[in-house]
Image (spheres, helix red, strand yellow):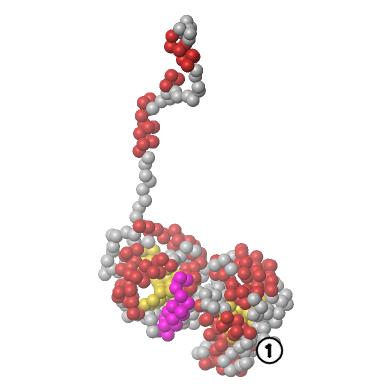
Amino acid sequence: MLFEEMKITKSLRRNLAEMGLTETTLIQQRAFPVAMSGRDVLGIAQTGTGKTIAYLLPCINMWKFTPNNPPQILILVPTRELVVQVLEVAKKLTADSSIKCVGVFGGVGMVPQAEAVREGADILVGTPGRLLDLILDGHVSMKNVKKLVVDEVDEMLEQGFRTQLGRVFDLLPKKRQNLLFSATLTGDIEKIVDTYFNVPERVEAAPMGTPLENIDQHLIHVPNFNTKINLLKYLLRKEEMTRVLVFVSSIALADKVFDRIEEEFGEDADYIHSKRTQSQRFRAVKEFGEGAMRVLIATDVVARGIDVSCVSHVINFDLPIEPEQYIHRIGRTGRADKQGISIAFCSPLEVDKLEEIETLMSNTKIPVDEMPADVEVSTVLTDAELPTYKMRNSFMETNAKAGSAFHEKSEKNKKTNHKVSHQTLMKQKYGKHYDPRK
């Protein structure tokens, strides 16, 4: 379906065209009429399916000017990177209007954000923690919120934002429209929906756990960490690796992988995780998005804010702990109906994770590629990969095997703490005829 065919304002059509968007994605097409009807929406869609436009488009299309400064549209997201990404799209869609868009998030001083909100914010995008701080300090009021959007709610719950979400919901007007979007639907999400939402209509872009059709998946079995490093370097040397997102499961691993490839790819690569400063993270994402940098190593949490349409390859350096994260990861390529490629490394210690991922994808087997012959297979293992041995307690085993050599002491050899008088001892020594007077 074309955006031209949708019942939206001329300015929205014009702004979409300037953004190079002419045709809707499935989630945009299905969510728009439900949202425009005023009903609550529960959208199930994977990363890369166009969720941001799916909720911004109807919200902006229904926006009406009011002289009050408090926001009409509130959008909650889990990370500062995602705040920036959503805010950027919102500003492009409202480029020639009087709608003011403001973003707030933690990790930076609150004063500039408080001033920006007080000056007017028709659309307010924020993380739950920082938004709650602004509300409780009196910098922003929620009384005029008409549309609440909660994006990536599964990730919010994963990061422990449940309490903050509940407190924000309690401060909002009861009469409002709710739009919730998630890649997965868990029991915790259903509880939130039942408690705070008004019988939302469920719309899906694809069943949960279904990989995007335009992503070509590959799997390579790799014996250990050092061989994974050799394989990663081998792949990054290929010309077709024009923009590569490398996923790792921990901060320590992100540091370690970058250290190992920095000498060869340092000028063309960077890494992001929650321990890096905001400026470092923003700069890395910006340079990666603009093509000034070719390789970006990222952990799962911060990767939620990476909205780059031209990622050629996603490499899973290790398999995620939660199988759903695999879908999120590979969804960073193959965006906007473009073809993408994902490559997963799987060590012997990760076979169970692989089985869980394939089970989630309706028992879809990821095609296996042979290890390239030019990749050196290392025999050096990390501490985590070294086999563990159960230490035997030789002393106890020796005692057990000794049998009768280790037995209870006889009565005469047992030590007691009973006090015995001198007279008694003498009688025991000399017999009953002992006379102490002699």
Q: In which quarter of the image is the C terminus?
A: top left
Residue drawn at x 38%, y 81% as measured from the top left: 293
- Compared with 89, 351 (above or below) is above
- Compared with 302, 225 (above or below) is above
Give the residues drawn in magenta, as a range: 273-291
Instruction: Determine which quarter of the picture holds residue 158.
Output: bottom right
- Is label 1 in a helix, a strand or a loop? loop
- Compared with 356, 270 (above or below) is below
On screen, residue 316 versus residue 134, left or right, reads left
Q: How crowded is mark 1: few (under 14 residues within 10 Å), some or many (20 or more)?
A: few
Q: Mark 1 points at which residue?
A: 64
> What x and y, as percent, mark residue 23?
54, 87
Residue drawn at x 39%, y 69% as measured from the top left: 255
Residue drawn at x 47%, y 74% as measured from the top left: 303
Count of numbered badges drawn on the protein: 1
Q: Which amino acid does label 1 sit on?
A: Lys
Q: In which quarter of the image is the N terminus?
A: bottom right
Residue 84 appears anywhere in the view = yes
> What x and y, as percent, mark residue 165?
63, 70
> What x and y, as percent, mark residue 214?
46, 77
- Compared with 394, 124 (above or below) is below
Foreground residue, 200 or 393?
Answer: 393
Q: Is residue 400 magenta?
A: no
On screen, residue 169 versus residue 394, left or right, reads right
Outermost residue toward the right? Answer: 175
Instruction: Determine which quarter of the picture holds residue 143.
Output: bottom right
Residue 184 appears anywhere in the view = no
Residue drawn at x 34%, y 59% as measured from the top left: 382
> What x and y, as percent, mark residue 28?
58, 81
Q: Please, what is the dominant secondary structure of the magenta stretch? A: helix
Outermost residue toward the front? Answer: 437
